[in-house]
Amino acid sequence: MTGADTLAALEKIGFTDRDCLPLRFSFEASSLRGAVDLAAELRAYPRGTVQLRPGALRLRGRCPWTVVLRTPSIPLTSAVISRREGEMQEIASRRAGCRFVGWTPVLDAVDVNGAIFRPERRPS
């Protein structure tokens, strides 16, 4: 699923480019050392939080590491999302054994209800 697909799905449930949500950017690192280095770089992101955890065990017995950056709320516009995706891809490309997996919105019930039940979306 691409970033454009995720934005389209958010639009289908009522979110617009006027909305802001926190996002979760995910990375995969082939080694613990690579994951720790990547996490250290991501911690420089203003007001972001970083999580580091083991990934799913692979057939060859190697366990990649998952690194996740959760951002503060940002506008859900294609320009802003594309810029952030580019930044994350660049960060991953500078590190051997690391790759940018993608992003997902951080949704809670208040966000979803607010998008679905907006006054302008109610039938007259």
Image (tube, rainbow, N blue to C red):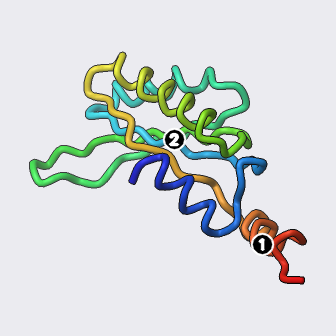
Q: Is residue 64 above or below residue 104?
A: above
Q: Is residue 76 above or below residue 100?
A: below
The mark total stands at 2
Q: Which quadrant would residue 78 be assigned to in this image?
A: top right
Check disc 1: other Cα within 10 Å, few if <14, some if 14-19, many if 20+.
few
Circles 1, 2 touching at the beta carbon (< 8 Å): no
Report the quarter where the C terminus lies. bottom right
Q: Residue furthest left?
A: 60
Residue that mark 2 sits on: 25
Percent position (x, y) of residue 33? 34, 25
* Foreground pick, 75 / 42: 75
Q: Residue furthest front?
A: 124
Residue that mark 1 sits on: 113
Q: Which quadrant would residue 29 be assigned to in this image?
A: top left
6 relative to 74 in the view: left or right = left
Mark before the other along the chain sequence, 1 or 2: 2
Check disc 2: other Cα within 10 Å, few if <14, some if 14-19, many if 20+.
many
Q: Is residue 73 visible?
A: yes
Which residue is painted at 60% across and 67% down in the image?
12
Q: Amino acid at mark 2?
A: Phe
Q: Is residue 36 above or below residue 111?
A: above
Q: Secondary structure at mark 1?
A: helix
Report the quarter where the N terminus lies. bottom left
Percent position (x, y) of residue 69? 56, 38
Q: Secondary structure at mark 2?
A: strand
